[in-house]
Image: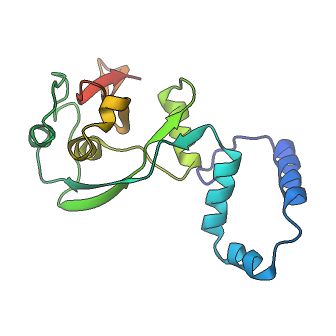
């Protein structure tokens, strides 16, 4: 609910809240209870993981170093990609930021096909955001084998192709930063 978008009717929310409260363990000790009271962010994360199972992490987090001072062409060169779509340009995907930053990435897999908007809503529910092209390319350069196992997409960088078709960047078996329609 932190996004301000209600995704459940008030009556259902009240019923769910009641069911959760009824199922809380009664044998919890006061120290543990106080720990949850004082660390509500951790409690929220645990509850989200338990109650919103549609999105799951593929594995652990992946730390990457993003050099925002590199051009898109330089980032692609560092990644030594097998193929690059000709539409993957700074005109279509402008670079943002400056300096060198450490970023922690987390891959999220959905057990079903989903549109971009639904994926973005699920990420908000998990207190995550989608990666930008700079982070995607840094990830691909550091972990080249991951995108050969399954496609990796960054919905944070979007190009409006022909004014109506949304294109995002992703990498797949061929290890290509390749715009794909959403």
List x then y, in percent, for residue 162.
29, 17
Q: Is residue 31 left or right of residue 149?
A: right
List x then y, in percent, for residue 143.
27, 44
**Nearer-the-camera pick, 165 or 102:** 102
Q: In this view, does 39 lie to the left or right of 155?
A: right
List x then y, in percent, for residue 72.
14, 40
Q: Residue at x 63, y 73 (%)?
A: 39
Q: In this view, does 76 lie to the left or right of 154?
A: left
Relative to 112, does residue 136 appear above or below in the rendering?
below
Query: How was the colour assigned to the protein in this rendering?
Result: rainbow
Relative to 21, does residue 26 appear above or below in the rendering?
below
**Callout count:** 0
Relative to 130, does residue 118 appear above or below in the rendering?
above
Q: Which residue is drawn at 61% across and 58% down?
A: 45
Residue farthest toward the bottom in the current orientation of the protein? 31
**Nearer-the-camera pick, 179 or 159:** 179
Q: Which residue is drawn at 75% across and 82% down?
A: 31
Q: Can residue 44 be seen in this view?
A: yes
Give the position of the C terminus as an image quadrant: top left
Q: Can residue 169 be seen in this view?
A: no
Q: Residue at x 36, y 31 (%)?
A: 149
**Nearer-the-camera pick, 151 or 90:** 151
List x then y, in percent, for residue 145.
28, 37
């Amino acid at each position: 609910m932190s996004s301000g978008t209600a995704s459940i009717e008030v009556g259902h929310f009240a019923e769910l809240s009641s069911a959760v409260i009824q199922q809380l363990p009664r044998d919890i000790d006061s120290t543990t209870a106080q720990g949850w009271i004082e660390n509500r962010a951790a409690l929220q994360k645990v509850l989200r993981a338990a109650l919103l199972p549609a999105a799951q992490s593929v594995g652990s987090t992946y730390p990457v170093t993003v050099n925002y001072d590199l051009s898109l062409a330089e980032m692609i060169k560092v990644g030594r990609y097998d193929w690059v779509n000709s539409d993957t340009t700074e005109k279509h995907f402008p670079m943002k930021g400056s300096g060198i930053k450490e970023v922690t990435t987390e891959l999220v897999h959905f057990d079903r096909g989903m549109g971009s908007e639904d994926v973005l809503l699920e990420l908000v529910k998990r207190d995550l955001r989608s990666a930008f092209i700079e982070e995607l390319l840094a990830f691909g350069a550091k972990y080249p084998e991951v995108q050969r196992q399954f496609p990796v997409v960054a919905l944070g960088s979007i190009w409006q192709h022909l004014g109506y078709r949304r294109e995002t960047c992703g990498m797949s078996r061929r290890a290509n930063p390749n715009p794909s329609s959403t």
